[in-house]
Image (cartoon, helix red, strand yellow):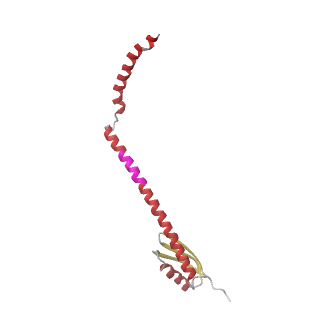
Amino acid sequence: MKNAFGLKVKVIVVPALLLGMAVAAPIFAQEDNGSASQSMHRAGESAESAASDTGQAIKHAYHGAATALSDTAITAKVKSALHENKVTSGSDIHVDTVAGVVTLKGTVSSAGASATAQQVTQQTSGVKEVRNELTMAPTAVR
């Protein structure tokens, strides 16, 4: 029984399997759209493109975070300057900053207070532009 399944089978089957794999390997390795070298080149370009896209995403995320931090600092400086100014200190002014552009919203007592708030904001370091959307409080009827 050992001879039937042992040595004689191995002598015939193993070379047949090796021959079959040797013949089949080039068929499976071939692609319709080019050589293995071209395929590897395309894979390398694809990986390089993915790495570049990832790098760009990281760069944009960094710049977005840096801009947000800068905007937060500008907002704090403007709020502080408006609070310290005698004309605007008691006013209800909301400050919003996006990419260095400061928007002022809220209510002030007069057109002069609105102009002062705009001037104080424009003089704050880091401010690129001021959008003054302040309204004047209605005067009380006596």
Residue 27: quarter of image = top left
Could you say which is closer to the camera, residue 97 or residue 47? Answer: 47
Which SS type dominates the magenta stretch?
A: helix
Residue 67, relative to residue 20: is it above or below? below
Residue 95 in the image: state x and y as whole percent. 55, 74
Could you say which is closer to the camera, residue 110 or residue 101? Answer: 101
Residue 74, relative to residue 26: is it above or below? below
The extreme bottom residue here reads 142
Q: Is residue 9 left or right of residue 74?
A: left
Q: Is residue 31 left or right of residue 92?
A: left
Could you say which is closer to the camera, residue 141 or residue 1? Answer: 1
Tell me where the magenta segment starts and ends, as one range: 44-54
Residue depicted at 39% across the width and 53% down the height: 52
Residue 91: quarter of image = bottom right
Residue 69 in the image: state x and y as whole percent. 50, 67
Residue depicted at 43% across the width and 59% down the height: 59
Residue 90 in the image: state x and y as whole percent. 61, 82
Q: Is residue 135 left or right of residue 54?
A: right
Residue 68 in the image: state x and y as whole percent. 50, 66
